[in-house]
Image (cartoon, rainbow, N blue to C red):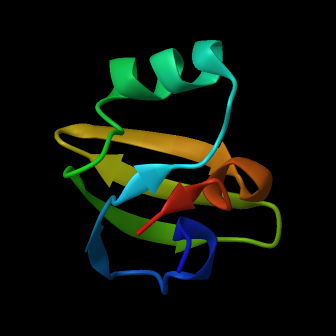
Amino acid sequence: MTLRTVEPGKEVQIKSINTEDEALKSFLFSLGCYAGESVRVIFKKKRNLVLTIKNGRYSIDSDLASMIEV
């Protein structure tokens, strides 16, 4: 299951980041988005998700969300 399929309001734990792009992995890590971390989907639109990671709120596109396995 990916982050893209998670219903709003649900908290899930990240299992892995499925990309070979090391810069993208590094960016997500700097946000606190890495394996073992809990995230909560706050709002979901067709192309974007708003989620909380630790104490931050972030907006990501659905393509990126589909790379995050939960």
Most foreground residue, 10 or 64: 64
Most foreground residue, 51 or 20: 20
Most foreground residue, 46 or 68: 68
Residue at image location 53% in from the left, 68% down from the top: 3
Q: Position of residue 4 (x, y in %)?
A: 62, 71
Residue 19 placement: quadrant: top right
Residue pushed farthest front? 20
Q: Is residue 54 left or right of residue 20?
A: left
Residue at image location 50% in from the left, 81% down from the top: 6
Residue 11 placement: quadrant: bottom left
Considering only vertical position in the picture, is 41 above or below 31? below
Q: Is residue 16 left or right of residue 18?
A: left
Q: Position of residue 40 (x, y in %)?
A: 31, 65
Q: Is residue 10 left or right of residue 60?
A: left
Considering only vertical position in the picture, is 67 above or below 32? below
Q: Is residue 45 left or right of residue 18?
A: right
Q: Position of residue 46 (x, y in %)?
A: 81, 72
Q: Position of residue 31 (x, y in %)?
A: 36, 26
